[in-house]
Structures are given as structure tokens and as C-alpha cells.
Image (spheres, grey):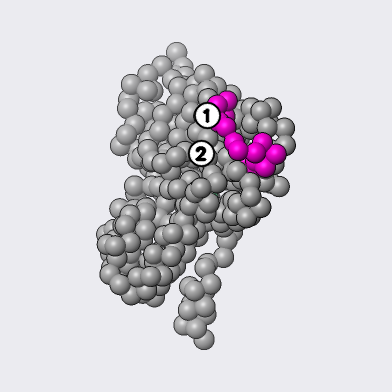
């Protein structure tokens, strides 16, 4: 009798996006240039492993700028901050090192442009997510958060001729499409961004996990519970009628998930480091999953430059 071949399908692209890569680089350079303790507002990216590694290097994560001594350097996380937080940092004479992802900054610009033009902005996103709090802060009196289809069905605006929608960068593409369809039906004059606010990395990882779900009986997503895009990957896989779980690390893997399973799909959210994916592959090997096939969906070549304040100082150090 021959053993059933146990196979792993590994998504590509997976894991770090350009915005997360940049945010991590920012903190590493800032530690070198400004020393420790280095203050970072909010978790630099939503991943426990990354946050804990930085803590051990002397990074102090704060949610409140009052906890940062006057005159210190402060790094803003990849999720961005509201203008009020920026103002508070200036008032406290903090040196701002901004690791906001440029694709989040794009949404900030759009929201403030629509606000200046007198629009009501329907911001599709999760109310308590750091990114949404930051973008909404651009125009709090003109912005209404739409979290789910019921909100889209009920929302009222002062002038249906002056209404715009924008989205958080890490939403489910399908959920966002459903909500925008409702909004377009209710407000035929609604306007939106020229290009989708859902970023390239979110889009690629969601499409890749759908491919995996066609091949694998079980999908494992490496990512932390507070990572929006990692949660969406798990939900999308589950929506394809495949058993799907989110794991912070390989130690979260439960043997019972693998009972009777011969094919596992593995992917990782945009804030999850590759080292954790490799650890999970190692753990799966112990259960007989040795055969790994990478399922390449698309190639990503996007990179973002460091913030000017760091780039200039690094240049000075080099010369
Ligand atoms: S997930 Fe998208 S928006 Fe968020 S940091 Fe990565 S590239 Fe930027």
C-alpha cells in the first residue's frame, strides 16, 4: 500500500508588502540614528513577532503622545495618523519620522481633497482600525464610516449630489465591491477615487489565496489577529468553502486541523515575516507534508523610498 502524498501549496506573493518593508526599515534606521528608547506611535505594523523583536531592541510603542518625553523622536506607524496627532507631535516638539505607507497617504490626500470641495465622504472601513482613525481624522465632520452593507443601505447624507466614497487599503475586494454597488444605486452621483484605494498587495494576496483554495483542502494564513489584511485572507479562503485558520506562529498549529488532510495551502498577510512562514513549513513537515509547490500568481516589484528625514541623514553619514 502506498502513502497518500501530502502536499503544500505555497502562495506567491505572500507576506511583506512594500509599505511594511519600508516601515521596518524606518524603525531600524531610526534606532541607529536616534538611539533608544525610540518611540513608535502604535504598533509599527500589525504583527506580534515584529513588535516584540523591536521591543527587545529598545523600541517603546505608545498610543498616546503624552507618554513620549518632549523633544524625542517619534515614528508614526505604517497605518498613518490624523492631522490632530501630527499637530500634537509638533506642539510637544517631537521629531517626526513618518513611516505611513505612501498608499495610505494617498487616501489621506483624497479625503482632504473631497472635504475641501464640500463633499460628504463615505469611508468604507473598520471603525477601530488605526488606518481608518487616521484617514477619518482628515475631515471628521464630513466623514461617515461604512463598515458593512447594512450601513450602506441606511446611511443618509445632506446632499446626495455631493457625496464621495473611499476605502481602507486592506479591505476584502469583494466586500468593498458589494458595498460600493449599494452606494452607487442609492447615490447615482457618488464619486470615488481614480484608482481603487485597496492596495496592490491586498489585491494580489487575496487573488492568490483564491487560487490556493481551488487546490488545497486546508488554508493556513500566517498573520496576527489584529492584522486586517491577514484576517481578510482567512475569511476569503473560508468563503471558498475551505477550512481556513489564522496563525500568529507555527506553535498555533493544531494537529487536529491536519487529520485526513492531504493538501495544505499556506499564505501570509502583508505584515507577516517570511521567517514565520518557513517555521510553519517546518512544522508541517513533521506531519508528513514534504512536497512544496509554489503557486505564483504575480510578481511584485514595488518598493518605497525612506522618508526624507532619514534619507538625508543617511546620505550625510555616507559622505
Ligand atoms: S498593505 Fe498596502 S497599504 Fe498597507 S502597508 Fe502594505 S502596501 Fe501599504
Residue 167 in view, yes or no: no
Q: How many marks?
A: 2
Gap between marks 1 and 2, in whole Å?
8 Å
Residue 109 colored in magenta in the image: no
Q: On the image, numbered disc 1 is attached to which residue?
A: 151
**Vertical relation: 33 (above or below) 16:** below
Measured as percent of width and height from the top left, residue 294 is found at: 56, 38
Looking at this view, is 7 or 68 the one in front? 68
Contact, mark 1 vs mark 2 (Cβ under 8 Å): yes
Quadrant position of residue 202 = top right
Q: Is 152 a magenta residue?
A: yes
The residue lying at 70 percent from left, 39 percent from top is 161
Look at the numbered disc 2 and say if its residue's Cβ is closer than 8 Å to ligand 1: no
Helix, strand or loop for disc 1: helix
Near-viewer residue (102 or 263): 102
- Quadrant, the N terminus: top left
Please name the residue shown 32% across and 67% down the image.
38
Location of residue 261 in the rendering, given as x and y in whole percent from the top left corner: 44, 20
User: Mark 1 or mark 2, which has the lower sequence index?
Assistant: 2
Which numbered circle lies on residue 145?
A: 2
Few, some or many C-alpha atoms within 10 Å of disc 1 (few <14, some 14-19, many ≥20)?
some
Q: Nearer the viewer, residue 210 or 290?
A: 210
Amino acid at each position: 500500500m502506498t502513502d497518500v502524498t501530502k502536499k503544500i501549496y505555497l502562495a506567491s506573493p505572500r507576506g511583506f508588502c512594500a509599505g511594511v518593508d519600508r516601515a521596518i526599515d524606518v524603525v531600524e534606521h531610526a534606532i541607529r540614528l536616534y538611539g533608544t528608547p525610540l518611540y513608535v506611535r502604535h504598533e509599527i505594523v500589525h504583527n506580534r513577532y515584529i513588535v516584540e523583536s523591536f521591543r527587545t531592541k529598545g523600541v517603546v510603542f505608545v498610543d498616546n503622545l503624552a507618554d513620549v518625553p518632549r523633544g524625542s523622536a517619534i515614528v508614526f506607524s505604517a497605518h498613518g495618523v490624523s492631522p490632530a496627532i501630527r499637530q500634537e507631535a509638533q506642539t510637544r516638539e517631537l521629531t517626526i519620522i513618518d513611516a505611513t505607507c505612501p498608499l495610505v497617504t494617498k487616501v489621506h490626500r483624497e479625503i482632504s481633497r473631497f472635504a475641501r470641495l464640500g463633499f460628504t465622504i463615505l469611508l468604507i472601513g473598520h471603525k477601530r482600525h488605526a488606518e481608518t482613525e487616521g484617514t477619518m481624522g482628515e475631515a471628521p465632520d464630513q466623514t461617515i464610516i461604512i463598515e458593512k452593507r447594512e450601513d450602506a443601505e441606511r446611511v443618509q447624507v445632506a446632499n446626495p449630489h455631493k457625496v464621495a466614497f473611499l476605502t481602507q487599503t486592506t479591505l476584502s475586494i469583494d466586500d468593498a465591491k458589494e458595498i460600493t454597488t449599494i452606494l452607487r444605486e442609492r447615490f447615482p452621483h457618488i464619486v470615488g477615487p481614480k484608482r481603487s484605494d485597496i492596495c496592490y498587495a491586498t489585491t494580489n494576496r487575496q487573488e492568490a489565496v483564491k487560487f490556493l483554495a481551488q487546490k488545497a483542502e486546508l488554508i493556513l494564513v500566517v498573520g496576527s489577529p489584529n492584522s486586517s489584511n491577514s484576517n481578510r485572507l482567512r475569511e476569503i479562503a473560508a468563503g471558498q468553502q475551505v477550512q481556513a485558520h489564522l496563525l500568529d506562529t507555527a506553535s498555533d498549529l493544531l494537529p487536529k486541523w491536519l487529520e485526513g488532510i492531504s493538501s495544505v495551502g499556506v499564505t501570509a498577510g502583508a505584515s507577516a515575516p517570511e521567517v514565520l512562514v518557513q517555521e510553519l513549513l517546518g512544522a508541517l513537515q513533521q506531519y508528513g507534508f514534504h512536497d512544496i509547490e509554489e503557486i505564483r500568481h504575480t510578481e511584485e516589484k514595488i518598493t518605497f523610498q525612506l522618508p526624507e528625514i532619514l534619507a538625508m541623514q543617511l546620505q550625510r553619514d555616507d559622505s
